[in-house]
Image (cartoon, helix red, strand yellow):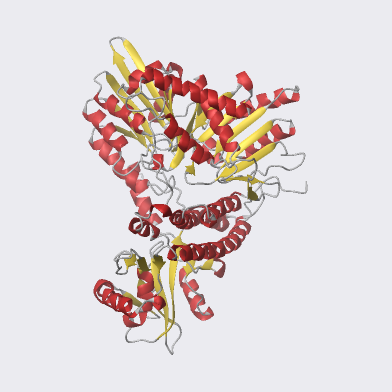
Amino acid sequence: MSKKVYDNRELSWLKFNNRVLEEAQDSSVPLMERLLFTSIYGSNLDEFFMVRVGSLIDQKLINDNDKDGKTKMRPSEQLSAIYSKVGELNEIKDKTLSAVNKELELRGIYHRTMKSLSKAEQEFVDSYYAYEIKPFLNALIIDKRHPFPFLNNQDIYVIAKISSKSGIKLGIIGCGGKYERTVFLPSDDSGRISFLLVEDIILHYADKAFESYKIEEKALMRITRNADIDVDEGFDSELDFRQNMSVLINKRKRLCPIRLQLSKTISEPTLDELLLRLELSKKQTFIEKSPLDFKYVFSVFGKAANRKELFFPKAEPQQSRMVQNGVPMMQQIDKGDIFLSYPYESIKPFISLLEEAANDPQVISVKMTLYRVANNSKVIKALCAAAENGKEVVVLVELRARFDEENNIGWSKLLEESGCHIMYGPQKLKVHSKLCLITKKSGKAVRYYTQIGTGNYNEKTAELYTDFSLMTANRDIAEDAQNVFKALSVGKLVESSKLLLVAPLCLQNKVLEMMDDEINIARAGGKGYVGAKLNSLTDKVLIDKLIECSQAGVKVELVIRGISCLVAGIEGVTDNIRIISIVGRYLEHSRIYLFGTGVRKKVYISSADYMTRNTTRRIEVAAPLLDESIKERVIDYFNTQLADNVKAREQHSDGKYAHVRTGDFPLDSQKHFSAEAYANAPKADESAEAVKKKSIFSVIIGLFRRKK
């Protein structure tokens, strides 16, 4: 085989982050949004280093001969490739930000340097430094008598080489925590926005911070620490799970440095001394012309909020066409399944369902899994209200949701104080499913309302991420959901189910069975089909089965936002597989599984990607779509994304991605879905019959568009 059928997970992720950076380079994207995409590139990279690079460094220390199962690369080889690629991408990032800043200047928004200040502005900054910064500065000398200080993860510092006759003497000044990061210069009536970053001011005045010394060179620096902690190891048996998580969070803050960012090149002796102190290598050092941290972007967003032309046009989540105004949600779900598509449609109907359950005297229990929730969460408030109203409320709070551990510890305490029963899930298995079960008893009759989603119960991300939410009164689905909660309550795993696919024991194997069915149909001369919309594809068992599908003649279509360890289009191997990635205004987060064609087509929505961690090391749930109109709607959604020729990039047989440029008319699938949601949203005075007709009409239009 002349081309590689597998791609390395980490290098594939870097290709995804490059696609994010491409959005910052796209002149059709409004300028402030381009600035935001540059910021997203940086924050993505921060997390990548803390988690994935940190994990590889740990693997290298344990056993550098433990090779990647797909590309056979050792940890050290992967790290070298990562460092090299990140260096290339950072150069592109620096040029991208420079271009964006130049265009912003044409619109009156200036990211200033100390050298560019006018006399009046210099006087303002002098005064600002004297009264707002200098009193709080802590300048440290490091030499043989003064130990190297602990540097906080991702904080920015000034590093200075101080003149000395006896070896290298360093000076360090902290730039974070105590000061406003973005310093806006006084503006005139023109509405011009000019700002400096506080670290640049501190760097400029560093000589004054070390008044008794001569500074020979200085730069800004930022370190990234390893955040890869195995939360299931090293637990203190005397502490409960929540207390142990608090201990581990504090431990993470002190893990070893794995990356050094510098704002400029410093001399070899100074760099060598710094790297020696940090126990880093030159490969782990990155010289960057851009700010070392992009969080300042959000304060600039706030200042420029009235410049509407610099942002995406306002788009608010709309009321779903399936939801009737003024009618209780449970009553509507009794009549038929309800499906929501975020962020085009609002999460409010689901919040209303929870609030109804909290106050309905006939509701006896609410059970739910929580992974990440919003600040000031209405979901949490509804669950607390339900418990306070005497309902049995069982909530599994996943304390191991990375970087949300502290938030979830706080939420678990609040829920517990309100009378909710809290669970934490089985050891070594994260609970990533999005599952809610409401039980209602009226006389002898018991009804169940189950919600299954692809995304978190988070009102904020429901406006930013594409996700699906299914609400159903189907008793078989409710029975499966009940079994999931029963298993979680005793630390067991679901071993069988009627309709739901439940990882780790009843998802991967069932997906493989459905792929095998398509292989058998194709080999018998029929039309086999497999489709999926995913965040990432890394599970080698599923990848190899997809290869088998392709070789058997099964048509495979995959929409994968991020990592794909499978390379499509290789003759004789994956030439029946097409892979596209969509990166746009919203973060693509929903998951769809499709199998078969025509009347035998099966469609699932799921919380699980085709990643080994999801299929074998997490509690995940996929739900079948049984309502024909909803099924057709999701198939149409998938086909519309496959037809995207604006934000879609197609993977080629060399593993590289290129924009799709086909068709006579541009189709941005995200814009299409947003416009569709606005067009279909029921009006305040619209009758239920009109809403129903509109829903049917939309399905017919979708079918017509696919045939065309």
Task: Please indicate whether residue 352 sits to the left or right of residue 581 in the image.
Answer: left
Residue 591 visible in image: yes
Task: Please indicate whether residue 567 sits to the left or right of residue 101 in the image.
Answer: right
- Closer to us: 15 or 107: 107
User: What is the x, y in percent for residue 209?
Assistant: 32, 80
Residue 172 visible in image: no
Q: Furthest residue to the front?
A: 190
Tell me the quarter of the picture where residue 238 sits. top left
For residue 157, above or below residue 160:
above
- Closer to us: 177 or 273: 177
Task: Please indicate whether residue 608 sits to the left or right of residue 363 in the image.
Answer: right
Looking at the rendered structure, the number of numbered marks drawn on it comes to: 0
For residue 597, above or below residue 78:
above
User: What is the x, y in percent for residue 11?
Assistant: 60, 53
Residue shown at 34% from the left, 32% from the top: 348
Residue shown at 44% from the left, 32% from the top: 679
User: What is the x, y in percent for residue 664?
Assistant: 63, 40
Q: Furthest residue to the top?
A: 444
